[in-house]
Image (cartoon, helix red, strand yellow):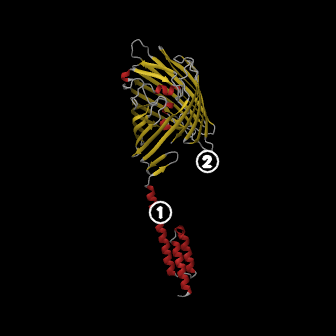
Amino acid sequence: MNHRRITQLGTALAVAGALCTPGARAANDAMIELLKVLKDQGTITSEAYEQLKSAAQGDDEQNTAGQSEIKQAAETLPKVETKEKLEISTPDGAFKWRIGGRLHTDAAFYSNDTGTGDTTTLTSGADIRRARLAIEATLYRYWQLKLEYDFAGAADVDEGIRDAYLRYLHTEGWPLSITVGQFKEYLGLESITSSNDISFIERALPSRTFNDIGGGSDGRRLGVGLNTFGHNVWTASGGIFGRNAAGETGADDESDPITFVGRLTLSPWHTENRAFHLGVAGSWLNPGDAHTVRIRSRPEARIGADRLVDTGDLDAADVNRYGLEGAGVYGPFSLQGEYLRGDVNRNVAGNPDVGFHGWYVMGSWVLTGESRQYVFEEARFKNPKPKGIVGKGGIGAWELLARYSTLDLSDEDVDGGEEDNVTVGLNWYPTPNFRFMANYVRVLDLEGGDFDGAEPEAFLLRAQAYW
């Protein structure tokens, strides 16, 4: 074999070997041009050129087919989302499974100026306010379910089931959702807002007070609810509810209350950093066989705090509840307020009907420039999401807050007391899943009731994680 033949054979083998390497697959066109130059120079024969050219083109077609198969296989694999949550879903989104949870660890420090000398009424201490795990699922795109359990028993809420419902979500044409199970009744903006997203450590005086009339676990009851919205402007919700899953009614655990609730909201404009919200809600409640209700409230603190205003057990044929709500967000500033009222129609001859009411107004300023987020379909707000993450060169989001609230539970022959509170707070969001909170609560004035003249103070802390 002469030197020229050896050179041709060596070149051909080298080129063929190069074509088989993964790095050469993206350069097959350039390789064909090189083969043409070698043929023109006489380094390889025309026959060898055609053979090597065919090999290069075949390799390219094989790579294309292989990449297509890999892409098709990837499109059928479940998607796993781990950013800020743990969610597994099919590529088309028709099936989703999510594991969520929250952990709220609180501490409270009180001055015991209760006006009675009773130092056991407000007891400083620490506790786990909430420790919840939840499973949420979407099945066949339109069917949803949620089961949430709270492992922490704090203050007046025992451990147990929180949300537990099935939901059908119709999104084509006229949007409509139908929910069956235990969930929050539609009464008030702050009440339906998640405890992960309320601005202060505890809700304002009237918010939970009127939601828990007739029994409720954080405003939750067993029932059936409908929700719809339209034109990106209005929402409407309504439902019929009974007791909660724990069987608590607030007066007689053997009673079977029934409640009709409706809520209508308007939001003519809402963007990423601006929103305007108005709402009205109403409810008729029959306390059931107990014919009794009790209306009371803690001083916007739960850990170690007794109720400073309390009507005691009231005979009741039924209760009418009403609510007005308004809120606005303009960049880092927000303002929110509500008025809530409950009218008790008595069922014992000679006892006059009574009405109780309360309201609050709160404002916040996110010092780092973020905004509270508005969820239009649910007509509620969520926390500001920090732009700069701690650990990634940022300082998180910092929020200053102030609130004034009042609750009057005295009317006619009922002396439950009237309480006025002021609260200031500071929130820090180092990441979207963590929040640290500090609140100072001062009872400005308490008239009537068992704690007439009380002016206690509270300093509250919370470390919160949620996903």
Name the N-terminal-most of marks 1 and 2.
Answer: 1
Query: Residue 236 at x, y = what percent?
Result: 45, 33
Residue type at mark 2 is: Lys
Q: Is residue 113 left or right of residue 155?
A: right
Which numbered disc covers residue 392? 2
Residue 36, by quadrant, is bottom right
Circles 1 and 2, Cβ within 8 Å, touching? The answer is no
Q: CA distance from mark 1 to mark 2?
A: 36 Å
Residue 166, by quadrant, is top left
Residue 109, by quadrant, is top right
Does residue 51 sit above or below 361 in this rendering?
below
Q: Nearer the viewer, residue 27 or 271?
A: 27
Query: Residue 143 at x, y = what percent?
Result: 39, 42
Q: Is residue 231 visible?
A: no
Query: Residue 379 at x, y = what percent?
Result: 49, 35
Crowd class of label 2 (few under 14; some 14 to 19; many from 20; radius 10 Å): few
Residue type at mark 1 is: Gln
Residue with the most extreme bottom position: 2
**Which of label 1 and label 2 is nearer to you?**
2
* SS type, badge 2: loop
* SS type, badge 1: helix
Residue pointed to by mark 1: 67
Crowd class of label 1 (few under 14; some 14 to 19; many from 20; radius 10 Å): few
Which numbered disc covers residue 362? none
Q: Nearer the viewer, residue 30 or 439?
A: 439
Q: Is residue 359 visible?
A: yes
Does residue 80 sit above or below 271 in this rendering?
below
Q: Nearer the viewer, residue 259 or 30?
A: 259
